[in-house]
Amino acid sequence: MYKVSNTEFFSVIYAAFQLTIVWFFVQVVLLIKGIGKMVDLVSKRMFDSFQKYAPTNALCNESLASIETLKRFSHENRTRKKDFQNAHANLFAIKEDLPQVAIEMQRKACNGLTCYCIKSTSPVNESRRELTNLALKNILDYCPATKKVTLMNRIFNHLAQVYELKKYPYPQVEGTVVRDERVKRAIDATSLQQFQDTDGNDDDVYQGLLQRNTARAKKLLHDMRSKLSDFLLRFTSWVLYKLLPCFLNAVVVHPQDVEMLQQAGKTNLPMIFLPLHRSHLDYILMSFILLNNDVKCPLVASGDNLRIPFFGSLLRGLGAFFIKRRVDPIMGRKDLLYKTILHTYMNESLRAGHNIEFFLEGGRTRTGKPCMPKYGILSVIVEAVIDGTVEDALLVPVSINYEKLVDGNFVREQLGQPKEMESFWSAIKAIWHVLNSNYGMIRVDFNQPFSLCKMIKTFNTNGRIPTTFNKQLKSNPSSTSLYGTDVVSDEHKSIVESISKHVIYDCSFTQAVMSTNAVAFLLLNKFRNGCKAQVLVDALEELKLDLIAKGKEIGFVGDNLDIINYSIDLLGPGLVRKEKDKHEEYIRPVAMLPNVIELSYYSNALVPTFALDSLIAISLFAMDLSKGYVDQTDLIEHCTRLCDHLQYEFIFCKPCQTLEDNILGAIDNMIQRHECFSLEPRNEDTSSKRVYFNADMDDDNDVYIRPVRLYLNSKGKDHLLFLRSLLMPLVDIYAVTAECMTQLVGRNLHERELVGDILEYIRTQLRAGSLQYQESVSVDPIKNALKLFQKMDLVEIHQEKKIRLYYLKDEQDNDESVRVVYDKINAYRRKQTLDDDIFDKLATREDEDEVDDEEEEEELVEFA
């Protein structure tokens, strides 16, 4: 007979206590909201009755305001007063009854089919790739048919739904991890190393170290492990059905995406969900959607900063396992024991059939655009497939986007202030604020699942990876990252990096564009000084056509004016304002600190889509335009160098593509869509593509590229200026950061002090008028610029625990070396006026064509 241990009994009692508190909290929130709605309804009917029978007076207002209207009027007055007193403060958004924006889409292609390697490795039926006419479905309104249609099921539909959900086993693997030979070897190795560092030779000392490390291994595993509970998942799902409508209009997914996941689940292979990380709500929404569509919920890798009282236990019961953000060294050496525990725990979870979810970006994006991938956890999964721990795994990239970010904003952090750590009371305060606000719609897109095993074979170009092998732990220099240490072989690093960048690129490409993203993008980059409503309507229509041409998914439909009004109300008066001037309505962005940083967050969701176009425009302005044309080869060379400077900001192409081909494609799009350039007549048949001539020489690499001239077209002048403005704030930040590297000549600085000095210098430049864009005051791009300078062998970083010390390399420790790096970046900030006489020069060149043909023939003869 099975006996319940004291620990298990205490866990059940504690879980019941947690559920009781959650249930009580939900009832209180619903009661407060219900009372508010009831009072408002009664007052409104009383005022309507009074208005119906009360005598009218020409001097009086025609109607009385309800309590809801009076509250809104009072709220607006307080907001207006606060705005007047402090124009630079972040104004809170006013919650109103916002007009609904339709969420139905007519057609949607299967996400994730962005290159040959995805197509060839996907296990999903080919029939799923065709376009469908299925509409998006709102998960909050979605309730599948119950097995038995009864009166109780109709009344308690959500309760009936969570009761009839498919039940999956969620085995605990804590015991198998402790008994694993890999863990035992790590305990022995750690104890032996510590014993060698001591002066004693007594065996009792070694045994004491062995017992201490064994206890530490169990403690690490106890703090890390997940306690995924089917009952807690169902109960939380019911709670979310009650709470999410309090602050969200919709949580939409496409039925086709759900069918793909259900079909992938039938393969009995573990699924690895890889979403873009925007909010703490991401992992809760993921489990909520998967549970209610009969897909097995995953274990979720969470930072140990979320292991706070009550909420940490709740997240653990929903599938979270907690990992350290940084693996701090022990006694100056890498923490082999912790990394082995984490590695083994994930391997055993995969072997037990668990799905796993983690964020490749590591943390939430602070800028609105995808972050560069972190390779640690994915490298463990890749190793598990290579060494045969699991037969295969299905990677599922996921794109999540919010009309309004639930977590608030990251303005404080971007201005250089330290991050506020999560706590119990901060979580309670944030939840209460969220429940009394409106955040619009959330869109979740699941991309095509693909086989990790076949992806490894695709990127294994050198063929050095064996089918199976017995992996032994080994030492590597890194001591703060799981990647590149004791669990990843050197020959596998490039494969892990290629897969990671491919996933981030696909997630960014398939991320739906929300209405707030489009409006913020246009106002911040095209109408920074404001514009009329109709002008913004026309620009939005043009932007939608550009997005469709680039293959982007648009997450809104409807009348453009309604969409704009909806987005402005959702963003709030702190970011966008409506003003009337001479009976005409103007819409203006709040383009001043700190508000502009939050507005740029929503705008940056679209910036990766136009990143290459913007870099082409910036590179063009950095070249000599006096002749009215540029050589395409020179333009590509300039653009490639600029892409290298911004390599920590964007992923410009997938690992299976070449950057040059993507740049050529962007130039073609600028020619065809916006007529930015004109081609010479003899090259029109090849568009802007290169024309190769085989030299038929001994060296096969010798080819001749016919020069293609791109003539400036006056029709695309405004579009070029618009594209240039997209990434100029980033170029400014990198140039100013390079200029500030002179502060490191002959000395070193802590990271916080160095970044603070750079931010202050940027503010000084803004006040002096040397910089134009207020959003240049941002911490993340500065840190990325420092990474670039480290790669350029200008800066070195010494890190000990949480302290990062910056200093110049010995051979670069002088002003001249800093000036060289600064000049390389500052060359792209060249300001030149686009006079009308440099445009449309192609029409005047007909008489010069014969001379050019003769020169080209001479070049061919010399080359041959």
Image (cartoon, rainbow, N blue to C red):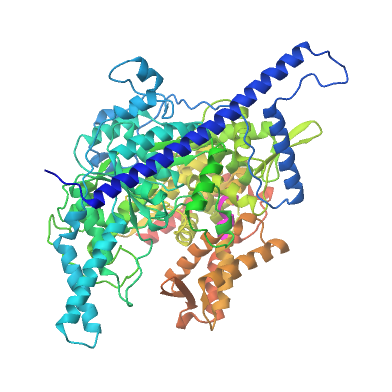
> Toward the viewer: 311 or 763?
311
Question: Image check: 607 left or right of 20?
Answer: right
- The span shown in magenta is 725-731
In this view, which residue lies farthest toward the right?
59
Q: Position of residue 766 (x, y in %)?
A: 68, 61
Q: Position of residue 215 (x, y in %)?
A: 24, 67
| Residue 678 seen in the figure | yes
Question: Image check: 707 left or right of 289?
Answer: right
| Residue 623 seen in the figure | no
Q: Residue at x 65, y 49 (%)?
A: 90
Q: Residue at x 76, y 15 (%)?
A: 51
Image quadrant in which the C terminus is located = bottom left
Question: Image check: 387 left or right of 372?
Answer: left
388 to 678, vertically: above or below: below
| Count of numbered circles on the image | 0
Please, what is the dominant secondary structure of the magenta stretch?
helix
Q: Position of residue 415 (x, y in %)?
A: 59, 60
Image quadrant in which the N terminus is located = top left
